[in-house]
Image: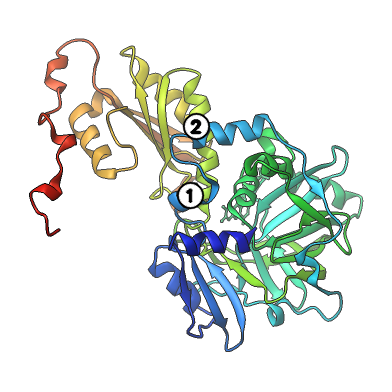
Amino acid sequence: MLRATLEKLKASKDMLICQQNVSSEYELGAILKHFNNKTPILFNSVDGAKKRAIGGLYGDRNIIYNLMGIDKETRIDKFISALVNPRDYKIVNDGPVRENIVKHNIDLKRFFPIPKFNEKDSARYITAGVLVVKDKEKNNYYTSIRRFQYLGGNKLSVLIASKKLMNDFLKMEKQNESMEVAIVLGYDAEFLLSSQYSTDLYGVDKYRIDSALRGEPLELVKCETVDLLVPAYCEIVLEGKIISGKREPEGPFGELMGYYGIEKPQPVIEINSIMYRNDPIFQIAFPCREEHVSNGLIREIELYTNLNKIVDVSDVYVTEGGGYRFNAVASIKKHNDGDGKSAIISGLGYNSELKQIVIVDDDVNIYDPQEIEWAITTRAQASNDFVIIKSALGSALEPSHTISGTSDKVGIDATKPITGDIERFERTKIPGYDKIDINKYFPTI
Ligand SMILES: Cc1cc2nc3c(=O)[nH]c(=O)nc-3n(C[C@H](O)[C@H](O)[C@H](O)COP(=O)(O)O)c2cc1C
């Protein structure tokens, strides 16, 4: 879990350590933002105390690949295989997370450095917490990251945007029942990634996906006050219930795309027990981009699968600039002149939030915005290759959608033709360029 991850990051020199005391109000978030939320930073002293926090952990896809022992070529197979071949987890009697157990006088802020990020945020927020719930009929565990607004003492509110979880809670609420939950902090990349598989779409036990991703059973211990299992080696577990019949105002909050989400009533969680390791490390994700990389990585398997039904797809990228959900680029091996347009149709249909997709040939590096711009400029003509669909479904996470409550979609076919005057598309080439040993010419570099 997290401690093993820190060892790996130290060894690969991918982590910074901050010994200076920092405030959890604005200062900590400002430092993470300075590094674009891409550099893992361990803060050894927060709020004038010995409280420790880690942020920026999973904001760089290459760091995630290294931690999981995968690369960009193997990732999609690995992620699909974990979904198709989930593995059993293992229940153990004890684990480090049970080193400290508190059941009375819980004031979360006293224990943990819960940060405030942006000027107009309504409160301090837990942003990296993974919510654990159990479908008791199927005996399936579902994990997902949700944001938790700190309401003081042992109370949090929770923003639930997914259909299944909200419907399950509303059903229980009708029977006056509260929903048992646990919030897990201080985890590794496998745990994070497994939480991002869509419950609505697959309904697969996320602990079993996690076990498949890590190649061995995830070790779980029982909670103290709720009937749930949680990772034995994580840093912190908050146990409680989403309370039936209760709502509190939530927001404004600086969201994914760098705008404030507006205040709305949201369900309330009461925490009844906390467990944590000695000298716990509180996990933080700056609420703009960082951990959405993980969400994008899982969305990419859905986009890949959708495209693969229709065309010969090489790779897909749900881009950073589009918050890892609104924009995508896909490279294809073109076999027919209709491939580009058909790829647009199936790409735009893969997720209701996607706004823009660019289809390129597989000689284009889809991770380099300059190459994408070059492909659009030299291989597309707007009247023929830009496909626009007006007023479809979208997402309130970006403000232009809220003007009409709908989203326009655009697909750009930036592939070159495979029939006709194709010589005009021959790329310039210097023989031997790839093999040139530059050190030979500048030995002092
Ligand atoms: C950093 C981060 C923050 C997220 N915050 C929320 C949130 O506040 N509320 C929410 O409903 N989903 C949020 N999500 C998306 C869910 O975690 C994601 O939809 C879920 O893991 C997939 O499971 P589901 O199908 O149950 O939603 C967040 C994702 C990430 C990566």
Q: Amino acid at mark 2?
A: Leu
Residue 297: % across, % down: 51, 43
For marks 2 and 1, give the CA distance. Answer: 23 Å
Q: Considering the numbered disc 2 on the image, is that residue within a helix, a strand or a loop?
A: helix
Indicate which disc residue 66 carries: 1
Which residue in the structure is indicated by mark 2?
Answer: 303
Residue 165's disc number = none
Q: Are marks 2 and 1 in contact (CB under 8 Å)?
A: no
In screen coordinates, is 271 left or right of 403?
Answer: right
Judge: label 2 CB < 8 Å from ligand 1: no
Whole-percent x and y of residue 71? 45, 41
Name the image quarter holding residue 159: bottom right
> Can you tell which quarter of the image residue 422 is in?
top left
- Residue 54 rendering spot, x and y as whole percentages: 55, 69
In this rendering, the answer to whether 349 lies above or below 269 is above
Task: Classify mark 2: residues with Cα within 10 Å, few (<14), some (14-19) or many (20+).
Answer: many
> Residue 30, image x and y in percent?
44, 74
Residue 233 visible within the image: yes
Asked whether residue 56 is in view, the answer is no
Q: Residue at x 80, y 78 (%)?
A: 106
Specify whether 111 is left or right of 170: left
Residue sitting at x 73%, y 48%: 218
Front one among 412 and 93: 93
Q: Left of 247 or right of it: where is 360?
A: left
From the viewer's perspective, is residue 431 above or below residue 91? above
Of 391 and 43, the residue lying toward us: 43
Which residue is painted at 24% across and 17% down in the image?
Answer: 417
